[in-house]
């Protein structure tokens, strides 16, 4: 076991534990925030595992997760807009913490890999992950009022 795998294990263990607890307990507002957080925690974990195991194919999984995770959250935000309007989730701290974690992981891996195709892929994954997480969190908190109109 190397440092990359250990970091991924700790990050995934803490993140998945928090998301499972959030999805399994509490009101709807906590559950949708935990669902959004799950992909934002799993994607950096896949990036770290890719570096730890030396398997660039894991980057493709992280790219797919960075694309589909926020899209799934946006679907939930649209379907549950009426229920969330009465009690919108306020997850600014969680969103910023998870986005910061993703940014740190991407920047460290970019520094390690050096310039090239892999670095470009890491930067795209990071932009999709952080941007998608911020947009999905904003949609959950009711920030896009026009999307609720038919």
Image (cartoon, grey):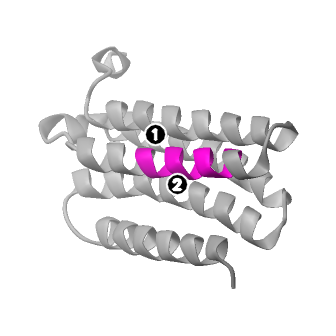
- Residue 39: assigned label: 2
**Residue appearing at x 35%, y 50% in the figure:** 97
- State the SS at label 2: helix
Label count reads 2
- Which region shows up in magenta? 100-110
Q: In the image, is 56 to the left or to the right of 6?
A: right
- State the SS at label 1: helix
**Residue appearing at x 65%, y 75% in the figure:** 5
Could you tell me residue 14's position as x and y percent?
Answer: 41, 73
**Residue appearing at x 32%, y 16% in the figure:** 149
First in sequence: mark 2 or mark 1?
2
Q: Which residue is mark 1?
A: 133
Image marks 2 and 1: residues in contact by CB distance under 8 Å: yes
Could you tell me residue 15's position as x and y percent?
Answer: 43, 67
Magenta region includes residue 107: yes
Magenta region includes residue 31: no
Please tell me which residue lies in front, 56 or 133: 56
* Quadrant placement of the N terminus: bottom right
């Amino acid at each position: 076991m190397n440092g990359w795998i250990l970091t991924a294990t700790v990050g995934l263990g803490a993140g998945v534990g928090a998301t499972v607890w959030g999805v399994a307990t509490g009101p709807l507002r906590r559950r949708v925030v935990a669902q959004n957080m799950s992909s934002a925690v799993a994607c950096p974990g896949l990036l770290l595992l890719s570096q730890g195991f030396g398997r660039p194919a894991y980057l493709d999984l992280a790219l797919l997760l960075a694309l589909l995770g926020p899209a799934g959250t946006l679907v939930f935000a649209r379907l549950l807009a009426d229920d969330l309007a009465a009690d919108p989730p306020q997850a600014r701290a969680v969103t910023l913490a998870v986005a910061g974690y993703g940014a740190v992981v991407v920047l460290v891996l970019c520094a390690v890999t050096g310039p090239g195709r892999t670095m470009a892929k890491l930067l795209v994954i990071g932009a999709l992950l952080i941007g998608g997480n911020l947009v999905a969190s904003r949609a959950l908190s009711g920030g896009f009022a026009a999307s609720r109109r038919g």
